[in-house]
Image (cartoon, helix red, strand yellow):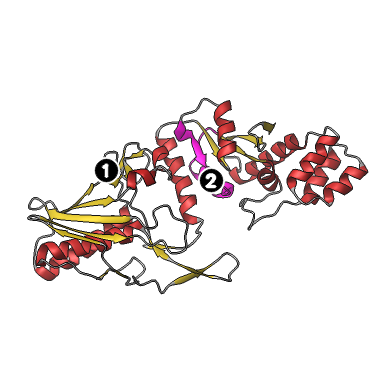
Amino acid sequence: MDTSADGHDENGQSPLRRGWTTGACATAAARSALSALLTGNSEDPVTITLPGGQRPAFALAHELIGDDFAEAGIIKDAGDDPDVTHGALVIARVSHGPQGSGITFRAGSGVGTVTKPGLKLAVGEPAINPVPRQMITAELLDLCTAHGVAPDFVVTISVRDGERLAEKTWNPRLGILGGLSILGTTGIVIPYSCGAWIASIHRGIDVARAMGLPHLVGSTGDVSEKAAQGKYALPLEAYLDMGDFVGGMLKYLKAHPVERITIAGGFAKLSKLANGAMDLHSGRSQVDTDFLASILAKLGASAALLTAAGEASSAGAVLDLAATENLPLAQSIAEEAKVAAARVLNNSGIQIGILVVGRDGAVLGEN
């Protein structure tokens, strides 16, 4: 496989190897399968053209030719990205379709089916996203033109063990059941990219809006989500795994509003939000203990406590210090975080709630 295009880590230092999306793998597999169906020989390695013009080549890991179909499979290489589908076998089966039917798509084993509205695909469609469909179609049309045949083929995409892998993705919440989605807008996986996570948040909002859900919860992690679930009797689709990307969620909500959004997170992360940070990752924003000390001053903290807070090594240490004087620091952070979120939503009419959650899942502050 051609993996010559490298990325870099967030510090611009160590080279990180890029990989290929499930959409790119499915496209390569489909092209090779159609070649086998038309000629009796698979293309191996098989070269495709990505939306950006790149021309990667993929080695086959699976091939099968039957009486009226052919299959080819590619092992997905996600590069240095911690992708749950890294190493998965993506298989395309191509068979003849009815005359005039064009190129149609089906979900095979391990590929999900859309069951809820709000996504880019209609309910009942296989979870093969629009750009991968366009890529596959372009490659198959190229082969059909070269061999002088009508482009009437059924493409069935499967992913070995895809149903189990899908449990680690957003698919169950998005109503994509039975397996993974075939994804990718560029064909390339950029290591540790924020874009894919933010896109998943957006799709979660789309599904919730299509279902008419008025109240959504964006959580920074599993503990804060469970705390919110214990407080609100909401359907699973109302809970967004926001992670560190509160800004990406709020900006999308401003353009695609719901009645109410609750932001749930740990004290340290929400103290960053309270101080105006919209990316809560430890590598992209830092806890400002001077900011926390300034809030403690408003709460009437002693001079000794303020000095200790300014010298503290973590947000948790400042919270512990506040407890020694019974100061409601977490509650103040909830109030300040709400103000920061409201600035982003900018009079959109969305009601905002904040839950500051401790490591043990207890709600420490609420607004």
- Find the magenta span and give its range: 236-260
Q: Secondary structure at mark 2?
A: helix
- The residue wearing badge 2 is 249
Mark 2 surroundings: few (<14), some (14-19) or many (≥20) residues within 10 A: many
Q: Residue at x 81, y 38 (%)?
A: 322
In depth, the one of 235 and 151 nearer the eye is: 235
Picture coordinates of residue 312 (x, y %)? 81, 50
Question: Would residue 366 be seen by someone viewing this image from the given angle?
Answer: no
- Disc number at residue 105? none
Q: Residue at x 70, y 45 (%)?
A: 271
Q: Is residue 50 above or below residue 337?
A: below
Which amino acid lies under the numbered mark 1 shown in the image of this protein?
A: Glu
Q: Can residue 41 be seen here?
A: yes
Q: Where is mark 1, residue-wise?
A: 125
Looking at the image, is mark 1 or mark 2 earlier in the sequence? 1
**Left or right: 325 as drawn, with respect to 3:** right
Q: In the rendered image of this protein, does residue 146 appear above or below residue 76? A: below
- Looking at this view, name the residue that lies furthest to the right: 303
